Image (cartoon, helix red, strand yellow):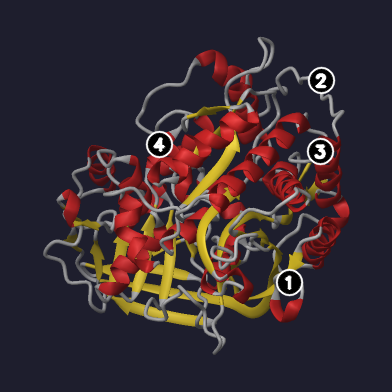
Amino acid sequence: MTRPLLSVACVLMLVACDGRSEDSALQAQTAPGAPMPPAPVVVNDTPAGQRIEADVRALADDRMAGRETGTPGFDLAAEHVAQRFADIGLQPAGDEGGWFQRVPLVRATADPDAAALSVARNGRTIALRARDQFLPLPNFNAGATELTAPAVFVGQAIHAPELGHDDFAGMDLDGRIAIVFGGAPRSFEPDPFAHYASLRTKTEAIVARGAIGLVLVNTVDDEAGSPWARSVAQASRPAMRLRDGDDRPIDAPAQLRAGARVAATAADLVFADGPRTAAELFDAARAGRLAPFALPGTMTLRTRSHIDHIESRNVLGMLPGSDPARAAQSIVHTAHLDHLGHGAPVDGDAIYNGALDNALGVAILIEAARELAQADAAPGRSTLFAALTAEEHGLLGAQWLVAHPPTAAGSLVANINIDMPVLTAPTRDIIAIGSEHSTLQAAVTQAAEAVGVDVSPDPFPEEVAFVRSDQYAFIRAGIPALYLDAGVSPANDSQNPKIAATWFLRNCYHQPCDQVDLPIQYADAARMARMSAALARIVGDAEAAPRWNDGDFFGTRFGSAR
């Protein structure tokens, strides 16, 4: 799972990012390095649970080498999923009648050693140190770039007239470098917060106003959750974008000629001799009172990136609909197949296997497909099952699928996504994040009654998970979607799913210990597969396709794209 919006601290603390303290007992039990909470006995005595376990063990095996996008390990995992789809009886829905959909990518790796960031102001030049004080952003359009231009601070780069908020008021960005803070005002409700905190939304906003460079400045609050050292440790990891038919990167505007991220400790160097200090701006950001201003002098950015073209693939299997009048509409089940590959060794282990993130989600998707394919009749609408690539690089496989749906799938009318269900303690519920935005909520209620499982509301709405996995690519295309996730209500008195999930996030999320020796509750996973299949049947048989609720934030903003 990729988490691009909020600080990692907020994700891990399981509380809102508003300064509230976490329960001390929970903090002690789940702190990094704390022993795993008492592990429940894993009883896996059902055929469905055993099938899911077999797939998790295969996909998270060291032979897959962490399933990094564009690597032989990922391709090996894709072959496994394709074979399972074939065994189940799905029809291939990939390119040229096969199981695989080609996903063309541009890969770029920035070189900090060749980067420079300096400020020329009031007769002096301030040069920041690469790695210690700044990191270059990868450039997908040019291997080497140098840019000198005036700089303008535009707060969090948010233009939200419907909320009476404009970080660009009175500022001219044309031909200038935009200096930007992350996040969004805490006064925003979760849905607009999620949208406006997205780096993609910020980038679109500054490009529309003519900016030619981007400098993201960390605040101290940012680094309380995600320390600068972590950013430095990840600086050598490549970034990716989709590639169009002319081999140009998608969503990487050439107009932005260079970019960098600055450490909070070096923020005063960026704002030196300006009207406000970094500390004053950090306080203003917390209070939601940032105001834009132009900075004197110029800023110079120099970057070098290694750029190459690679390919990966989505794995697509189809269950045709049984109703001729509705079979040309498809419900899309998704789970991302990629993970991080190799990384910094931890206790001698450098393979990031991704058992929960997201071998388990793919295994649940496969089991849901088996249940639907082996039923007496398929749902009225068609069902497309997709194991996606490049989620960890920005939901790229999902974005490509939405833009290039298989002809056989017809119109995509709903998405059910499963990503990193942390099923390490038994529960009696599931969570359907985002279902409240559309008529999918009624289908969730009906499916839960049929399966015999409780539905809990999103326990951490401040984490806006609705926009943080592959379903967001469908949302941006105007397609109603939801994100099925693990529940939080304990099935017994001895194991607390919240504690178990928090421990995983603090200790094993995106780490080598996300592997098959975790106490994965395969009975809960089998129940989630039944829930997913029941949802597909209810939505597939419904008279009308799902639609956004009247006045919904996402439906209003993206519904016309459909």
Quickly name the residue at label 4. 462
Q: Secondary structure at mark 1?
A: strand
Quickly name the residue at label 3. 48
Q: Earlier in the sequence, mark 2 or mark 1?
A: 2
Q: Earlier in the sequence, mark 3 or mark 1?
A: 3
- Horizontal arrangement in the rendering, residue 49 relative to residue 32 (left or right): right
Q: Nearer the viewer, residue 533 or 415?
A: 533
Quickly name the residue at label 2. 41
Q: Secondary structure at mark 4?
A: helix
> Label 4 near label 2: C-beta < 8 Å?
no
Quickly name the residue at label 1. 100
Q: CA distance from mark 2 to mark 4?
A: 32 Å
Can you say whether 277 is above or below 201 in the image?
Answer: above
> Label 3 near label 4: C-beta < 8 Å?
no
On the question of residue 291 being in view, the answer is no
Task: Locate residue 265, reporting x and y percent.
Answer: 40, 47
Disc 3 residue type? Ala
- Horizontal arrangement in the rendering, residue 443 relative to residue 219 (left or right): right
Task: Locate residue 428, reporting x and y percent.
Answer: 63, 23
Disc 2 residue type? Val
Badge 4: residue crowd in 10 Å (few <14, some 14–19, many ≥20): many
Tell me the residue at 70%/73% (across/down). Answer: 94
Badge 1: residue crowd in 10 Å (few <14, some 14–19, many ≥20): many
Disc 1 residue type? Phe
